[in-house]
Amino acid sequence: MQLGITLGMNAGLDMELVLEAEKLGFASVWCGEAYGSDAVSPVAWVLARTTRIKAGTGIMQMPGRTPACAAMTAMTLQLLSGDRFLCGVGPSGPQVVEGWHGTAYGKPLERTREYISIIQQVIAREAPLTHRGPHYTIPYEGPDATGLGKPLKSILHGKPMKFYTASITPGGMRLSGEIADGNLPIFMSPEGADAVVKPTLEGRVKAGKPADLSGFDIAPYTKIRIGDDLQACREAVKPELALYIGGMGARGKNFYNDYCIRLGFPDAARAIQDLYFDGKKKEAAAAVPDALVDQIALVGPADRVRGRLQDWKAVAKEGKIGTVVLTGATIEALRVAAEAL
């Protein structure tokens, strides 16, 4: 089992943390984006300041970049970093896509399939780029087209790279298994690993790939908070969980809320969302069950965290995950995790 870390969005870039992770043998660093800082710039900064650790976008929002732009970015980072870039892409959610990027949300699975396919075509350079799909038409043929567009082949020779999605819906996880090299589920537990593994394997079988996870990296984001007071550590991670479960989407259209229900906490999922929509954020955080935190996060004294990492390691030995990506880690937490493994 490998270890990774995430970079906090909009909070500056903690290179001391990154360099310590690299020194300890961590495999990867990931940076996401919402509607503030982008994912690519911090990743480029990390790759320029390191020599061994890989860095990935977790994820680039597809509506924010054309597929060709994403391909150019990915190829450039892969070339400059000596093959250390991991290309994570995803559709984001309807509130951000339509409210921030000002474009139609559309059908996220179709968009993801098209987007990765186009990037792969650009990198392969087997022919000038052409694509006809419900989301992208290349060359453009709309009613306002000049008629001067023509298929082009990248003048940069791209290198192979790994593609990741950040899927938590069953359909998204099936698609990830079908077309990608890894997935970054935002919540996961060792006990509930099959909720992610099963649909992923279904996608791989559909694509004619081996009916196991060989060559595929399930890399769950896992919150970590180390301290002698177990309950204080739990409480420290609850506000962010409440934000996602309660506030990241509309009622009936919140993928994180749906995922919480599938993890076995339907009553809590509804209560958290109701409180969040009523503007009661503190109460929403308080409604996050301790049991949910204990399942999906690494919290409490160092010995407790080390023991929980052994549970993750056992799941990895079963071939169900490849990487645990620590979120909210401190240097102390990095060292505890590295020592445990």
Image (cartoon, rainbow, N blue to C red):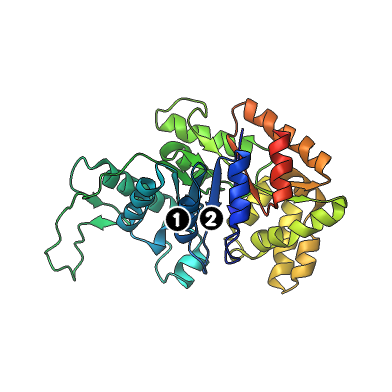
Circle 2 residues within 10 Å: few <14, some 14–19, many ≥20: many
Q: Nearer the viewer, mark 1 or mark 2?
A: 1
Local secondary structure at mark 2: strand
Residue at 33 percent across and 59 percent down: it is: 66
Residue at 63 percent across and 30 percent down: it is: 316
Q: Residue furthest left?
A: 148
Residue indicated by mark 1 = 44
Q: Choose between 200 and 337: the one closer to the eye.
A: 337
Left or right: 104 with respect to 95? left
* Residue 1 image offset from top left, x and y in percent: 61, 32
As displayed, is residue 210 above or below residue 322? above
Residue at 35 percent across and 46 percent down: it is: 79
* Residue 273 image offset from top left, x and y in percent: 69, 63
Q: Which mark is residue 31?
A: 2
- For the image shown, how many numbered marks are present on the structure? 2
* Residue 8 image offset from top left, x and y in percent: 60, 59
Q: Is residue 191 visible?
A: no
Left or right: 322 with respect to 48? right
Which residue type does callout 1 highlight?
Ala
Q: Is residue 177 visible?
A: yes
Circle 1 residues within 10 Å: few <14, some 14–19, many ≥20: many
Tell me the CA gap for discs 1 and 2: 10 Å
Residue at 38 percent across and 51 percent down: it is: 77
As displayed, is residue 125 above or below residue 60? above
Q: Earlier in the sequence, mark 1 or mark 2?
A: 2
Which residue type does callout 2 highlight?
Cys
Left or right: 102 with respect to 200? left
Q: Quadrant of residue 40?
A: bottom left
